[in-house]
Amino acid sequence: MFRISILKRLTPLVLAGVFVTASQSVTAQGVLDRLKRAAEEAAKKAEDSRKAADAKKAAEEAARREKEKTTPATPGGGNPNANSPNAATPARPGGGAAPSNVPGSSAKVEELSLASGQKLDFVVSPKGGHAAAVVLRGSRTVVVHDGVDGPRFDAISGESAGLVFSPDGSRLAYIGRQGAEFVFMADGKELLRVPAVRHPRLGSTSLESIPQFTDNSRHVYFPLYTEPVPGITNGYIQLVFDGVPGPQSFTNIAPIFTAGGDHHVYLAENPQKRGTFTLVVDGKPSPFPGGEPQMTADGLHVFTKRQLPTATPTTEVFLDGKPIMRAQSAQIYTTPVGSGFMTVVTQGTPGTGIHFLTMGAQRIPGTDCPWNPGYSNVGFSADGKHWVAACQASSSSFWIVADGKKGQDYQGIVAAGFTADGRFVYGANMRNQTFLVVGDQESEGYGSMLTPIDTSAPGYKPLLINTPLPPPAALVGNHIAFTALTNGTMQTVGVDGKLLQREGASPVTFSSDGTHFGFTFGRQGRTVNVDGKDLPGTVVRFQQPGVGRYRPRAEFVFSTDGKHVAYFDQQPGNASGVYVDGRLAMVFPGTNPQNLTFTPDGRHLIWMANIASSQTVYVDGRPSAQFDGNYTLQAAAGTWEMGADGTLTVVAQAGDAIKRFRITPGSDTSVDTIGK
């Protein structure tokens, strides 16, 4: 608290005494005039001082109120989360106060309790910073979603395992039981209500009917089994899409979704007339003949097939119910966008027959491949403009056909992908050497090549399934990089045709625009190399935000614009350091820091430090929020998400509550001010 000095009312009299003592020769009128002026000046100073004091108090009060709204963390041992159950415990990184040379963070921190309670069993959305939990409210059960209670139920099917978020995290679905009925809930509203006596499986722990969302999060669907009525009807399954049940089917329904989920197709078997199937397109019966349904990526067209009763096996292919092809067998591959498709056609018999490719229904010259094994699939570039297939003639004979052009024969092939200009990149093995082939250009031979991709990452799929090994090169735009192993201790790093030699080099990582590259190397300690320049410091691997159970690791990160690179290193005394662009920006307490993240504009750098039993978020090197050290939670999907506007969303544990923190960096700090 500041002390304000206020002039006393006696001050003018004191001043007057001074004037009188100083000069006895001054006339009485002159003395009175001076006394009057002195008194007026003193009074004016007193009034100015009072106004200044009032203004200061008002400013302090306004600042206090604003602080209570945003609940910012107070660095250096202040109250990090004023609304948390353990708010009385000050933030004390490493058990003591924050370093005295670290100014308070100007980051804005907003927090919201998503769920609370002892032994809380909750789920976190994969994106968006949302959470839900099943809790008791008296004798009833409710789902708490982002801190708001839903309707009261006798039970929730599957408990917390039955709570399902949409992929974008914006929607939540589950099943509740009220008396003799089950209620399907989506977005806090009733989607469908069914009698429990006809649908007893909904109360089991199998979770087979728990609602699911399409990939684009727009639609919710689930299979619904109805028990048979003896002597009246068989049991049947319906696909319920956005609350509307589709046709009945005796057998399980396997919907095929496309266009992110806006369209779907499946076969339904008549429960009363077994063996009779109906094609269902977007929930409605279709007159199209045949089975094995497929859709184009845009959802506008449907393929079906049927076997003709001919002397030799013959498959007839239909497009929107019209025949387009007859072949011994035909496997259709649709482009990732639009209505395009290609077909692998079989002709002859295994051992003597062939596979060949068609574009639409037109045969592509020069694509004949011995059948057995032959072509296993066709891959496309992301824009659907380029295609590739690998012909396997034998266990040691492969070649690539890309955009109709046949490549050389190799003993083994590993696909990497397409460059932005349509060149296909792959690794090729021949006589115990590995070559990187770009279009029709072949590199020199190496012992082997390291993959830059973690194949355990969710959603990873090889481009060509008959060459399932992970890709040997990193591709961004038209930039290509690889790390090749030799028989010696040195590795070769190749980036856009330029070669570097480093011991124990790792796979190359590009910045998002491909204009910068980095890798680490070394045996006893790891050094970062960026754009061919070795940077100071010894890097330590750190955990990045998780995706489900997947916990990726990294050694450095680029800013989105590629202008900055950051990494951690271990410092003495159980401390860590953060380097920015090769400069040791600061040392902070704790070991095993994680989630090193740039804002999208590259201006700010945020990370989390593990300090004693707590976790502290640093924004541009300044502590801004602190919560309990729930390391399992922080490795899960959706708990650390950088927004396009530069606001970081963190879901964390604070006492017996799960809270969402939204952290926006201040305008007075940046990567350039870290440690200053």
Image (cartoon, rainbow, N blue to C red):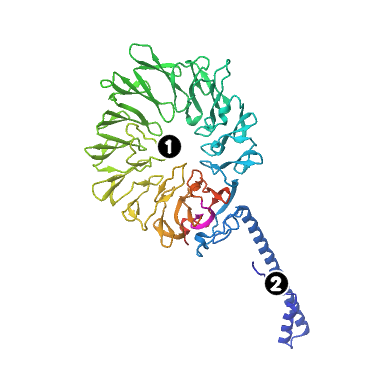
Q: What type is the residue that disc 2 sits on?
A: Ile
Image coords of residue 385 (percent x, y): 38, 31
**SS class, disc 1:** loop
Quarter of the figure with residue 159: top right
From the viewer's side, name the closer residue of 613 and 525: 613
Tally of numbered tags? 2
Query: What secondary structure prevails in the magenta region?
Result: strand
Residue type at the position of mark 1: Gly
**Nearer mark to the viewer, of 2 and 1:** 1
| Left or right of 4 on screen, residue 13 | right
Give the crowd class for mark 1: few <14, some 14-19, many >=20 residues within 10 Å. few
Do the residues bearing badges 2 and 1 touch, measured as CB atoms within 8 Å?
A: no
In this view of the protein, can residue 666 be seen by the observer?
Answer: no
Residue 524: x, y in percent? Answer: 32, 56
Residue 419 magenta-drawn?
Answer: no
The quadrant of the picture occupied by the N terminus is: bottom right
Q: Give the farthest residue toward the bottom.
A: 25
Q: Check disc 2: other Cα within 10 Å, few if <14, some if 14-19, many if 20+.
A: few
Question: Which dot marks residue 554?
Answer: none
Q: Disc 2 versus disc 1: distance between alpha carbons?
A: 71 Å
In the rendered image, which residue does mark 2 sit on?
6
Depth order, front residue of 124/158:
158
In-front residue for pair 320/74: 74
Element marked by disc 2: loop
Give whichever of discs 2 and 1 has the lower sequence position: 2
Location of residue 88 by image quarter = bottom right
Is residue 579 visible to the viewer in this orientation of the structure?
A: yes
| Residue 625 belongs to magenta span | yes
* Residue identified by numbered label 1: 459
Residue ranking furthest to the front: 230
Q: Provide the residue span drawn in magenta.
A: 614-629
Determine whether 627 is above or below 311 in the image: below
